[in-house]
Image (spheres, rainbow, N blue to C red):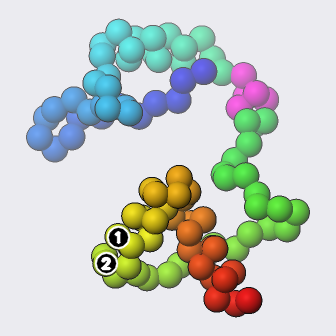
């Protein structure tokens, strides 16, 4: 089942999904799929949001970083093959210990 977003931007050019242009053939396939109908129960079962981190619900906390701070975090995350969030969580855990 495909879920898509297709539109023409302000410059009148065709948008893409994951870097690939959306073709008329793909639009036709999506239309045919929609017209055939979707299994609502299957859609409801597919889950929502990110998976949890452990047994307890997580809380989202907004934190502001400068561009320089983000660059340091992102460089380390890339080196270590981790996400930005992983690096921030690790730093907070280490500083609280």
Tell me what residue is drawn at x 63 percent, y 17 percent.
Answer: 37
CB atoms of marks 1 and 2 within 8 Å: yes
**Front residue (pair 47, 8):** 47
Relative placement, left or right, of 35 versus 47 is left
Relative placement, left or right, of 49 versus 68 is right
Tell me what residue is drawn at x 45 percent, y 11 percent.
Answer: 29
Q: Position of residue 59 (x, y in %)?
A: 70, 74
**Mark 2 closeness class: few <14, some 14–19, many ≥20 residues within 10 Å:** few
Q: Quadrant of residue 90?
A: bottom right
According to the image, label 1 marks what residue?
71
Q: Position of residue 72 (x, y in %)?
A: 39, 73
- What segment is highlighted magenta in the picture? 39-43
Q: Position of residue 91 (x, y in %)?
A: 59, 79
Residue found at the very far bottom of the displayed protein: 96
Question: Which SS class for mark 2?
Answer: helix
Looking at the image, residue 13 lies above or below residue 47: above
Would you say residue 79 sits in the magenta stretch? no
CA–CA distance in space, label 1 to label 2 = 5 Å
């Amino acid at each position: 089942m495909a879920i898509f977003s297709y539109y023409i931007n302000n410059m009148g050019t065709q948008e893409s999904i994951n870097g690939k242009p959306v073709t008329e053939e793909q639009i036709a396939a999506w239309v045919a799929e929609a017209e055939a109908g979707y299994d609502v129960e299957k859609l409801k079962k597919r889950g929502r949001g990110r998976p949890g981190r452990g047994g307890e619900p997580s809380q989202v906390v907004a934190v502001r970083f400068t561009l320089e701070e983000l660059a340091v975090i992102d460089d380390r995350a890339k080196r270590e093959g981790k996400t930005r969030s992983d690096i921030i969580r690790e730093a907070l855990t280490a500083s609280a210990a």
